[in-house]
Amino acid sequence: MSESSLTDSLRNGAGQRQLRFIDLFAGLGGFHLALRNLGHRCVFASEIDETLQETYLENFGMTPAGDIRDVAVESIPSHDILCAGFPCQPFSKARDHSEPADPELSELYKQILRVIQHHHPQFLILENVPNFERHEEGQTWERVKDLLRGEGYSVELEKLSPHEFDIPQIRQRIYIVGSRSPLGKFRWPEKSKTKVSVDSVLDSCPEEARQLPEQVDQCLDIWQEFLDLIPKDEKVPHPLWSMEFGATYSYEGTTPWATDVETLRGQRGSHGTSLSQAKTKEEMLALLPSHARAEQQEFPGWKVAFIKKNREFYSRHRTWLDGWMEKIREYPSSFQKLEWNCQERDPRREVRRIRDYVIQIRASGVRVKRNTTAPSLVAMTSTQVPIIGWEGRYMTPLECKRLQSMDELNLPARNTRAYAALGNAINVTVAQLVAEALLATEDTDATRILGRPEWAPDLGQLALEEASSVDQLSVASKEPV
């Protein structure tokens, strides 16, 4: 971190004061921890989840207000920095796109604009999934950017991941920073080139770790059998969709949904299942891989390419695949796909022992990664927690906390809630580096910060003010707004 940062000047300079920030869509409080580490003070937080409100109180001594849509902007204290990791589900590639996006969620960023338009804080730090930049072909980001600029902010956007800052998790997110002063001197945090290992966050065979259920354990054995059977000089298809082995439904220039019933009756679906056994078109579609059921005239090019790759692989190796796929077809769809992220340029050099790696079962398939990094934490169900293959167990909440740089925070008592909260959280180290870089662009004279009240510089008085502020917020959050 830069020795000339605003952090150092605020902590060491006579009469220089903390900045005040608010934490919207606060979750576990990643932004709160990042800004607190830099010496600044939270004056307001909002979080709709009641369990996370209780955890936030336990960690930070203040109860967040609830749904930000119900909060009057006039009741939010004046502040210098607005932080928000607003809900990402409408913009995420990981969400179930067979279901429509929640229009209320996709409009929540407008709540941030509502606060900005009233308070005009000097600085903004926003976080979301990378797809936010491309949502609606980039139109959503262009609208947000224009609105922020219309409110007098210089704005920059960058994609950052913890693994670029010596933390063994690949979790790419966009950060949007804004300032009411020009950002000509602003520089994003310098990325590290140090190699990382997930071992740095793991405990050795922790007693509290959850062991793999029989279904998962047996599924990994079946995929290991596949890796043993595939020729050493053959690359593992990526992604591998076993449901396409034996399938013959039409996919180029058309889709099953756009195909008439009589034509479908002569075709085959998942793992070669004959569609003629179904009586209705709806029943026929149910026998197809889930990725082939979309109500569209044509599949996108990337899907056509994936289907073609997997069918060609099956054609080359059906003599041994026919017997193998009878074992995998008994499992749920997410278990029937493999994402082998351990490729070498020369496949003969690959170590194809699935339990040597970090594994995660996601909707997209069984994801297998080298132990240099953990898979991206997501808002996880119990089956999506990363698996430490060589110990036959799931990662513990404590280990997942380390991946989010949240070692010192308490988590919800139930592990399922803890995992979900960590999957939605921001990485504290990344947020702290971004905040420090942004605040370093401002004149270190605290009186130049727009909207700054005249605080007494006495540290004891500041502590009294903070305690009073926390008490008032706790009471206010329990009353109807």
Image (cartoon, helix red, strand yellow):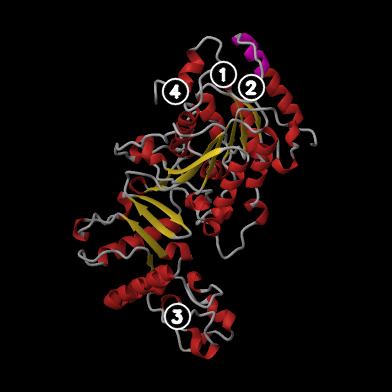
Quarter of the picture containing the C terminus is top right
36 and 433: which is toward the camera: 433
- Mark 2 = which residue? 452
Residue 4 lies, with reference to residue 124, above or below; the image says above
Disc 1 target residue: 446
Q: Which residues are magenta?
A: 459-466
Horizontal and vertical percent for residue 36?
Answer: 54, 25
Give the residue at mark 4.
Answer: 5
Secondary structure, mark 4, is: loop
Residue type at mark 4 is Ser
Check disc 3 and report the residue beneath it.
253
Q: Earlier in the sequence, mark 4 or mark 1?
A: 4
Q: Is residue 75 left or right of residue 376?
A: right
Amino acid type at circle 1 is Ala
Q: CA distance from mark 2 to mark 3?
A: 62 Å
Q: Main secondary structure of the magenta part?
A: helix
Return the disc, 2 or 3, that comes first in the chain's sequence.
Answer: 3
Q: Residue at x 44, y 31 (%)?
A: 185
Task: Provide residue 146's location: percent of width, then percent of height.
Answer: 58, 47
Q: Nearer the viewer, mark 3 or mark 4?
A: 4
Name the amino acid, label 3: Gly
Amino acid type of the residue that numbered disc 2 sits on in the rendered structure: Arg
42 shown above or below 84: above
Rounded to the nearest angstrom, the CA distance separating label 4 from label 2 is: 20 Å
